[in-house]
């Protein structure tokens, strides 16, 4: 599984309140949710984001509340993947559950600049910076997580994996 796109860069401790502000928690339509992504840190982000673009961030991306809408907003806005030095455990799992690729790699926030073009192979963990030619190596995602991403998230994965075993 590969993702590629232009880099949008954010720092450390990007919390769910800036990813998806709490005033919109009453909204559940994915298209509407997507229009407010990153509004708390960059109000113009969604207007400039292209389908498949990547976020590179520092430590503890997605910290704060456990709101699933933060990952949902990023996915439906068109973010192709998030590569960060580290993730909040809850955000990481919410992203996987919604089939939003996330890949931790210590030091990526120092190695990559905004606007560069990356290609990440989630199966091997290899991240190639097409702008600089540099290659970075992350720990590959476990097979069951890759399958979950490929199936479209946790619910489709479990339905396809466990329901067919029962019947």
Image (tube, rainbow, N blue to C red):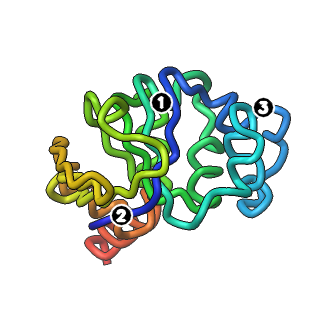
Q: Earlier in the sequence, mark 2 or mark 3?
A: 2
Rendering coords of residue 101 (x, y %)? 39, 53
123, above or below 83, in the image? below
Label 1 vs label 3: CA separation? 17 Å
17 left or right of 54 in image: right
Q: Secondary structure at mark 2?
A: strand
Q: Earlier in the sequence, mark 1 or mark 3?
A: 3
Instruction: Provide the residue designation for mark 2.
Output: 3
Instruction: Provide the residue designation for mark 1.
Output: 61
Rendering coords of residue 147 (x, y %)? 28, 63
- Marks 2 and 3 close (CB-CB < 8 Å): no
Label 2 vs label 3: CA separation? 29 Å
9, above or below 3, in the image? above
Q: Is residue 118 visible?
A: yes
Give the quarter of the image for residue 164.
bottom left
Residue at 59% in and 64% down: 50
Crowd tier of the residue under label 3, counting other residues whose Cα lies within 10 Å: few below 14, some 14–19, many 20 or above: some
Nearer to us of marks 1 and 3 is 1
Crowd tier of the residue under label 1, counting other residues whose Cα lies within 10 Å: few below 14, some 14–19, many 20 or above: many
Q: Is residue 142 visible?
A: no
Q: How many marks?
A: 3
155 left or right of 48 in image: left
Instruction: Provide the residue designation for mark 3.
Output: 22
Residue at 48% in and 51% down: 115
The quadrant of the rendering that contains the N terminus is: bottom left
Tell which of 85 and 113 is nearer to you. Answer: 113
């Amino acid at each position: 599984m590969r993702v590629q796109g232009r880099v949008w860069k954010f720092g450390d401790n990007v919390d769910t309140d800036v990813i998806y502000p709490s005033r919109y928690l009453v909204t559940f339509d994915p298209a509407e949710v997507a229009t407010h992504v990153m509004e708390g840190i960059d109000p113009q982000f969604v207007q400039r984001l292209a389908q498949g673009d990547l976020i590179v961030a520092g430590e503890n991306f997605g910290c704060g509340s456990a709101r699933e809408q933060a990952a949902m907003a990023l996915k439906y806005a068109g973010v192709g993947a998030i590569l960060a030095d580290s993730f909040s455990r809850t955000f990481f799992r919410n992203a996987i559950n919604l089939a939003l690729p996330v890949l931790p790699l210590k030091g990526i926030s120092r190695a990559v600049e905004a606007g560069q073009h990356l290609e990440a192979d989630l199966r091997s963990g290899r991240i190639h910076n097409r702008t600089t030619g540099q290659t970075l190596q992350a720990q590959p995602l476990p097979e069951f997580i890759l399958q979950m991403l490929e199936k479209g998230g946790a619910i489709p994965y479990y339905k396809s994996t466990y329901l067919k075993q029962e019947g």
